[in-house]
Amino acid sequence: MLKALNKLVVAGPVGALDTLYVPAVGAVQGVAVICHPNPLQGGTHSNKVVQTAARALSQMGYACYLPNLRGVGESAGQHDYGVGEVDDVIAVAEHARSEHGDVPLVLAGFSFGGFVAARTRARIEADKLLLMGVAVGKYPIETPAVPADTLVIHGEEDEVIPLSDVFNWARPQALPVVVLPGAGHFFHGRLIQLAALIKRCW
């Protein structure tokens, strides 16, 4: 996992958001907000998939912000099942842009975080969307349709979010899905390959 090079407090709509900051390698090409998996199952910004994505994106020149969304870790508020969390992500994105200027914005997330990132993209403009093991069909609110250039990466043997569910969501959109053969939900043993995929498919 990445070392917490910088720990920030970002002002959110219901209070402080405990956020990790991973600086870009070299000149800043853009900013990325990367959302963690379901906190009711232990998901936080220290999740290995989230930090793997941050490592890959930072090496591509993105300044990465990894917030603990409301009610998680030291962040204020209460878990809101992907509703209020969208407002948290927007607040972090606005903070990132205030620090780095009007640069390209990436929204990214793993599992529940992918669900939140997709819902955020339906609210605000972003230049790229990265969804890893995205939690479709898990919550009362449907995962919205996403832009055609969204990078969706999913494990063939995902035991939490079946690949068939992701295909059922992606098919009406004619949205490509990058499948890691043999990989489970948490990409155990496949994180290096996940990082390489992010870089290659960007």
Image: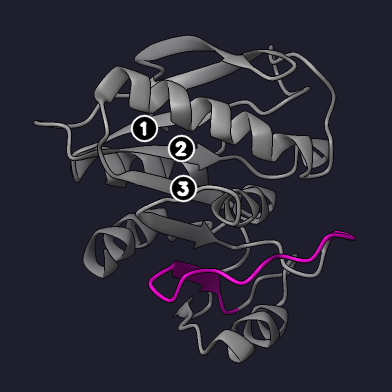
* Amino acid under disc 2: Val
- Mark 2 is surrounded, within 10 Å at the Cα level, by few (under 14), some (14 to 19) or many (20 or more) other residues, namely many
Query: Can residue 46 be seen in the rendering of this structure?
Result: no
Q: How far is disc 1 from disc 2 in space, using C-alphas?
A: 6 Å
Q: What element carries label 3?
A: strand
Q: Residue under label 2, please give it.
A: 33
Q: Residue under label 3, please give it.
A: 107
Residues under numbered marks 2 and 3 in contact, where contact means CB atoms less than 8 Å apart: yes
Which residue: 58% across, 50% down?
117
- Examine the structure image and report whether residue 144 is included in the region drawn in magenta: yes
Q: Give the range drawn in magenta.
A: 139-156
Residue ranking furthest to the right: 140
Q: Look at the image and tell me in which quarter the N terminus lies.
A: top left
Q: 96 or 5: which is nearer to us? A: 96
Q: Residue under label 1, please give it.
A: 64
- Residue 198 in percent (x, y) is at 32, 60
